Image (spheres, coloured by chain):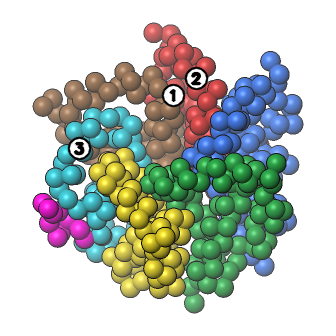
Chain colours: A blue, B green, C yellow, D cyan, E brown, F red
Amino acid sequence: MNRVPDEGLTKIPGGTLITETPELGRALAFDIARHTIHNIQPDLDILKGGRPNYATSPDSLTAAGHVVAIEFQTIAAANNYWRE
Amino acid sequence: MNRVPDEGLTKIPGGTLITETPELGRALAFDIARHTIHNIQPDLDILKGGRPNYATSPDSLTAAGHVVAIEFQTIAAANNYWRE
Amino acid sequence: MNRVPDEGLTKIPGGTLITETPELGRALAFDIARHTIHNIQPDLDILKGGRPNYATSPDSLTAAGHVVAIEFQTIAAANNYWRE
Amino acid sequence: MNRVPDEGLTKIPGGTLITETPELGRALAFDIARHTIHNIQPDLDILKGGRPNYATSPDSLTAAGHVVAIEFQTIAAANNYWRE
Amino acid sequence: MNRVPDEGLTKIPGGTLITETPELGRALAFDIARHTIHNIQPDLDILKGGRPNYATSPDSLTAAGHVVAIEFQTIAAANNYWRE
Amino acid sequence: MNRVPDEGLTKIPGGTLITETPELGRALAFDIARHTIHNIQPDLDILKGGRPNYATSPDSLTAAGHVVAIEFQTIAAANNYWRE
């Protein structure tokens, strides 16, 4: 098996939900969502094999965006929405 | 690849969740949702190619609206719901 | 293109999440959900063309109801649940 | 058209999210979810026509239960979870 | 009709969201989710007839797990997450 | 039936939502999500039989990731987002 490298399997990259800016918080949401998939399916060849279908299907993209939105909701709350 | 321009890849356009009005907060929710898709699939031709199916399918539109609703939930909380 | 009239494209009709009653808050949730669809697909003919399938499919109706539920969750929180 | 009676179109039956007990709050969640569908599709014959498929499909039932869960989340928060 | 027994139709079994432990709170989430289905479709034969398909489909199981997750979110909040 | 071992049926492994770190909280979210499936379908052979389809389908993986995101939202709130 062509396995996702170990750093791709960290569940919370960086080990914290706290970020300096909303942009970094959103990037973390993407990372957490992606690492979740890696943890469920760590075989890179299977992941890459599915990408052409997934990334060209509007409904699949919407579903992926939905998950990022949920992860971000958690991260934004953790950071008190970066209010000053 | 006909790539989405860089400004379309900013994850949180404007860099903040705070907006002056609910209308602007909702507009931000749309932008964040769209930029999420751009970040997952940055090829404009593929994005445009999927639009005719997606934008004429009620179920796809509902799913897209669902994501905007979640993004807005986060933004509305960030702004204390624009209460006075 | 037979375009949705401008007032159908306001993202937050009335410009506020605050309503006098739960009933009006729920009506706002419906409006926001509908205007979201209008903003993604502003061609009235396409919207009307999809309605016969959509509005007679239980699963499509459930999905639409799901979105209204999320929008209402935000509005209800904004109004402190109209507690006295 | 065999239209849902007017009382089935009230968006928030009873006009409040506050209930005496969790059981009544859950019943309200069911009612709100159902009235949402009635408002989107007020033709009783169409609604009844779809029921045999919908109510015998596990996935459709799960999706309906999901919506009730979201509505209840809002109602439970409104009632401070009926804590004493 | 081979009807679900009355106790299976209680919407909130036990009549409260408050539980002593997270494990019991999770069990309540399962029960509430199941009773929701029973209330929408109270015919046991139909429910049992759908089970072989539903319980062997990964996507159906994921969707069911999603609903339990939402119900638990409400129950966990009701119990202040069983923090000491 | 080749039944999931008893420890795989605990609904909240460890009996608490409180964890020392976000990484452990995320691991708990995975565990809770998996044990939910085990409780609904405790037959290991059926679970393993579905895995090849499920774990190679991008949409199924996205749906599974969605559930983990929801479970984590609850756990993160329980831990006050591990803020210091």
The chain identifier of the residue carrying mark 3 reads D
Residue underneath mark 1? E58
Q: Residue F8, located in which quarter of the rendered image?
A: top right
Question: Measured along the vertical axis of the image, is residue B33 above or below residue E16?
Answer: below
**SS class of the residue under badge 1?**
helix
Coordinates of residue E79 in the picture (x, y in percent): 51, 55
Q: Check contact, mark 1 vs mark 3: CB within 8 A.
A: no
* Left or right of E3 on screen, residue A24: right
The chain identifier of the residue carrying mark 1 reads E
Residue underneath mark 2? F53
Which image quarter is the C terminus of chain D in?
bottom left
Coordinates of residue C40 in the picture (x, y in percent): 54, 65
Q: CA distance from mark 1 to mark 3?
A: 25 Å
Q: Residue at x 66, y 54 (%)?
A: B48
Q: Residue at x 59, y 73 (%)?
A: B26
Residue underneath mark 3? D51
Same chain assignment for discs 2 and 1? no
